[in-house]
Amino acid sequence: MGIGGPASYDPAKSWCALTLEPRWRASVGVWALVISSGRVSTESRADELWWKTGVFYEIYLRSFADSNGDGVGDLEGLRRRLDYLTWLGVDAVWLSPFYRSPMADFGYDVADYCDVDPLFGTLSDFDRLLAEAHQRGLKVIVDWVPNHSSDQHPWFIESRSSRDNPKRGWYVWRDGAPDQPPNNWIASFAKEPAWTWDERTQAWYLHLFLPQQPDLNWANPEVVDAMHGVLRFWLDRDVDGFRIDVVHAIGKDPALPDLPGAGRSHVMINSDQGSQRLIRGFRALLDTYPGDRTMVGEVYILDTARVASYCTSDQLHLAFNFPPIWTPWTAEAWRQQLDIAYGAFGAVEAWPTWMLSNHDHRRHRTRYGSEERARAAAVLLLTQRGTSFLYAGEELGLQDAIVPPDRVVDPGGRDGCRAPIPWDATPTHGWPVEPWLPWPPEPARNNVATLQRDPMSILHLYRRLLKARRRSAALQRGDWKWLASPEGVLAYVREADGDRRAVIINFTDEAVSAPLEEIWQVEVASNGVDEGEPYAGTVAPSTGLLLGAVT
Ligand code: GLC
C-alpha cells in the first residue's frame, strides 16, 4: 500500500514575485519595490520542495556555541560553527528563540518580537548568520511564540496598567472573585491554575504556561495585525520560515469552557477551529513571499489525525507529531506509531514529520538506554517518508546531563536535555568558559572533534545516513510500504522513480534472521559493519540497516 500522495500544488502561487527588498523594509521603513530573483515555487516539483526533502537540525542556541565567554551560546558562536553543519549534511536549521526576554522560560517569554536579546547578540549578528547560512545552502527557520508574550512585553505592561488602556483587550482578562479562577484550566510547569489575579485592576489574566507568560488574545484583530507585522519583519530579513510555538492554542473559544479532566490545559484545549482560521491568515501572508517560506507548527495535541488536520495546503506546511517521542523501543510500539502517522497524514495528503528528541524532552539516547539503540533509531528516523528533525547533539550520542539540585534552572525540569554541546576534549570542551548547565555524560568521548576522528562513531553514522538520504529519490520523497519481518524486527521499502531502498530495524538485543525476497546490499549499517557487502539475511542485535537494491 502506498502511503499519502503528493501535496496539493497550486499553480496560482507560482509567479515571478514582485516583492520588497528585505533590508529596506526592515531598517529604513521605506517600501522600495524591486524584482526579487528568489527561487519561486515553479522551479520545484511539489514533491521536491526543500522542506519536504531536507533534514532539519534544531539548535537550542543557549547550549550550542559561545563566542563571548559568558557561558551562554549565542548567534556569533553558531555562525562560527556553520561549517560543522554543512560537514554533517543537514539542510535546514530551526533556531530556538533569541528575542529580547527576561528568560523566565529561557526565551519562550518574549519581551520584543523584533529584536535580539543582548545575551545572544544583535540584529546585525542575526543578519550575518543568516546570510552566511544561506551562502552555504542552509535554510533557517526561527521560533515564533504567538500564544503568549512575556509579562515584561510593553503590550502587557500597558494592558495591565488600567482597565481602560487601549491594549487591555490584547490579553485574556476576566472579572471574578480573587479566590475563584474563571475556569479549571491548569498551567504547564507549576501545575497550578492557569490564571493569576492582578491586584491593580482586580481581574484575572490567563497564562497557559508561567504567570510571566500571559496569553495574547487572538480574538482581537489588533493582535492579529501586530503579529502579522512580526512575521513580515523576519520574512523581510529573509528567514526561510517559522517554527510556531504552541500554535494549536491560539484560537481559543472565547467562552473559555471548563475542560473535562485534570491535566495541562494547553495539551487538552480544543481550539482547532479558531487556531486553523488564524493559521490560514499566516499562510496567506507567507505565500506572498517568494522562496517556499515554511511554517512548522508545534501542534502539541496527542491525536495524530487532529495534528494532520492542521497540514492542509492552506495551513501549516508541517506539524510535529509528538506521540513517537513517547514510544518505547519495541517493534510493536513503533509499528503502531508508523501506521497511525502514515494513515493520518496520508488521509489528508499531508507530509509527515519525524523527531525523536528536542529541547523539551529527555533525549532518546537516554530513553532507549544504549548507544546501539540510539544508532538503530537514527536509521529509523532518517529513512521515513516525511521530514525529519534532529536535535543538536543527538548525532554525538549525547545523553541528558545529570543536573544536581543546586544547578536546576528550568521551571519545567528540562535542563538535562539542554546540556551544552561539547566541541572537543579540552577541559571546557571548546567553550571559552564553563557553560550555564553541566555537561552531558562522557564529554571527553562524546564531543565533535573526537567523534569526527573516528569513522565508526555515531557522528559518522549520522553523516552517512544524511548523505545516503540526499542521493536517494526513494528516501527523499518515495513511497513507503511494509515488508514482512519476524517478531522484534520492522522492515519496509521506499521507492521513487525506479530508485529503491529497504530498511530493517532489529529492536531486540539478539541477532535475528530476517531474510528478504530480493537481493540487497548494505548501504549504511548502524554498527558500521559490512557496508557495501550483500545483505546476508541476519541483523545484529539493536541494529538498523539501510539497504540498496543491487542492479
Ligand atoms: C513550547 C516550547 C517550550 C516552551 C513552551 C512555552 O512547548 O517548546 O520550550 O516552554 O512552548 O512557550
Image (cartoon, grey):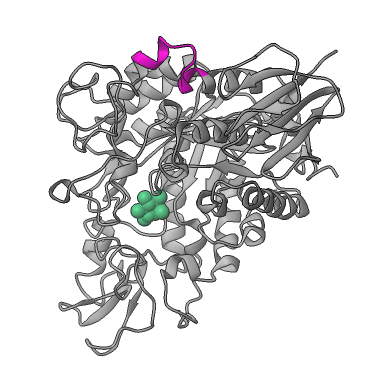
- Does residue 396 appear left or right of residue 305 in this picture? left
Front-lying residue, 450 or 212: 450
Residue 65 image offset from top left, x and y in percent: 28, 25
Residue 165 in the image: above or below residue 426: below
Front-lying residue, 427 or 308: 427
> Which corner quadrant of the image does residue 266 belong to?
bottom left
1 in magenta: no
Q: Residue at x 19, y 70 (%)?
A: 161
- Does residue 215 appear left or right of residue 133 in this picture? left
Q: Residue at x 28, y 59 (%)?
A: 155
Residue 278 in the image: above or below residue 349: below
Residue 5 image offset from top left, x and y in percent: 80, 43
Residue 466 in the image: above or below residue 391: above
Q: Quadrant of the C terminus?
A: top right
Q: How many marks?
A: 0
Residue 34 image offset from top left, x and y in percent: 54, 25
Front-lying residue, 262 or 509: 509
- Does residue 390 appear left or right of residue 330 in this picture? left
The magenta stretch spans which residues? 450-460
Q: Quadrant of the N terminus?
A: top right
Front-lying residue, 193 or 369: 369
Q: Can residue 290 be seen in this view?
A: no
455 in magenta: yes
Q: Which residue is drawn at 56% across and 50% down?
A: 324
> Which corner quadrant of the image does residue 419 belong to?
top left
Q: Is residue 123 visible?
A: yes
